[in-house]
Amino acid sequence: MADPRSTTMTPAELNHLADRLYSRGVSELSTVTTEQSRDLRIASQALRVLLHEIDRVAAVANDLGHTLTNLRISVEG
């Protein structure tokens, strides 16, 4: 059974979250401290890096899957 406190997000939603975190981190109107502002910007960047790595690994997995699907083995004898 899924945890009722958990949230499932799509990559687009995670990108939007990264945008919001960054905007709050650089906002002149924000009431957060300098350290919190830096943390928000770093969290935004970390999300973007993780999403990029997931995309990269997914592309590799897709390529390997295609290779395995089309694998041909020649056996002589």
Image (cartoon, rainbow, N blue to C red):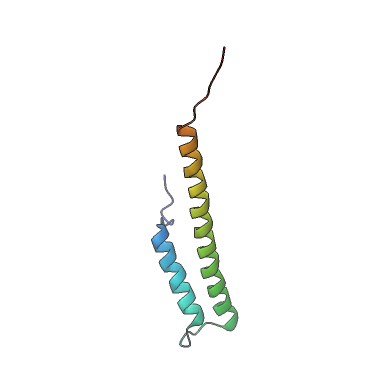
Q: Residue at x 51, y 59 (%)?
A: 52
Q: Is residue 15 left or right of residue 75?
A: left
Q: Residue at x 53, y 50 (%)?
A: 57
Q: Quadrant of residue 38?
A: bottom right
* Location of the N terminus (image quadrant): top left
Q: Residue at x 54, y 56 (%)?
A: 53
Q: Is residue 49 left or right of residue 3?
A: right
Q: Nearer the viewer, residue 64 or 58?
A: 64
**In the orientation shown, which residue stands out farthest toward the bottom?**
28
Q: Is residue 28 above or below residue 77?
A: below
**In the orientation shown, which residue stands out farthest toward the right?**
35
Q: Is residue 76 above or below residue 70?
A: above
Q: Nearer the viewer, residue 57 or 45?
A: 57
**In the orientation shown, which residue stands out farthest toward the front?**
76
Give how far across and how far down residue 44 sits, in percent: 51, 69
Q: Residue at x 51, y 78 (%)?
A: 25
Give how far across and how far down residue 21 sits, in percent: 47, 73
* Location of the C terminus (image quadrant): top right
Give how far across and how far down residue 74 sits, in percent: 53, 21
Give how far across and how far down residue 42 sits, in percent: 57, 71
Q: Nearer the viewer, residue 6 or 16?
A: 16
Q: Is residue 2 above or below residue 51?
A: above
